Image (cartoon, rainbow, N blue to C red):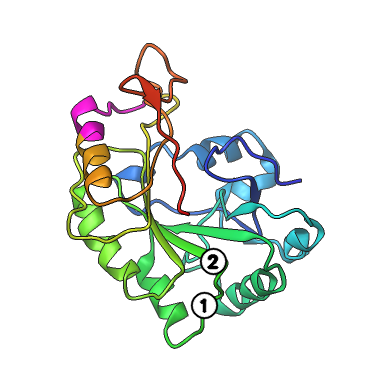
Amino acid sequence: MGRTNIEWTDRVWNPVTGCDPVSKGCDNCYARVMAQRFPIWNDFKVTLHPQRLKEPLGWKKSQKIFICSMADLFHEGVPFFFVDEVMSVIRFCPQHTFQILTKRPERMCEYFSGKFLPSNLWLGVTAENQQRADERIPLLFDIPAAVRFVSVEPMLGPVDLKNYELNWVICGGETGAGSRTMEPEWVLSLQKQCKTYHIPFFFKSWGGVRKNKSSSVLFGKEQKEFPS
């Protein structure tokens, strides 16, 4: 259970499924497309799965675990008491590294206000363009997470991160039907920024609009770096 093709993690854990669009990066949501293939996904409405809460307790080998690949844990439809349950499991599994990615950092800030964060928890935001980077990343820095990261995926425009001391940057183009173009100069600029500011840079792929749809080669080589 929990195996995934997402290269920057080892497993996914979905105690919540379903979401609603909040910005342009959601227009071709892969999770919504995937959910439409299976009626059990409840029309992609936000759904809690308490029966899945204990899944990581059975994974003994140390792994990176992406929480809610098919949802946003900080969606308004997820009550904080349920997020408490997720955090309890994280604390019970210090051998694992847990990764949370949200497009709703306001609610993430509200939840973590005044709380002690486990050291095995990485927090990230999605920033598909400069507007979303400037809206979401500052809120991430209000939370004292061990690792703070940004996912520039799908990359829909140039993004300047010079004002943000991040621990990790993920970048990738949009995939699937209706994929929007990611320009090479956007990626090169982001990669150069990361190199200048010593930020690990993980390039996922060019996305689905290019000839080699599965290519993760960036200017002659793969760049798949992780925080130390």
Dot 1 falls on a residue whose secondary structure is loop
The amino acid at mark 1 is: Leu
- Give the residue at the far right of this rendering: 58
Q: Is residue 116 above or below residue 182?
A: below
At 37% from the left and 11% from the top, the residue drawn is 211
| Residue 185 among those drawn in magenta | yes
Question: Which corner quadrant of the image does residue 52 belong to?
Answer: bottom right
Estimate the x, y position of residue 196 in percent, counting from the top left: 22, 46
Q: Are marks 1 and 2 in contact (CB under 8 Å)?
A: yes
Magenta range? 179-188
In the rendered view, does 34 fall on the left or right side of 173? Answer: right
Q: Residues within 10 Å of mark 2 (few under 14, many from 20)?
A: many
The amino acid at mark 2 is: Leu
Q: Is residue 220 above or below residue 54?
A: above
Query: Label for residue 117?
Result: 1
Q: Give the distance between the C-alpha atoms of the residues marked 1 and 2, in whole angstroms.
A: 7 Å
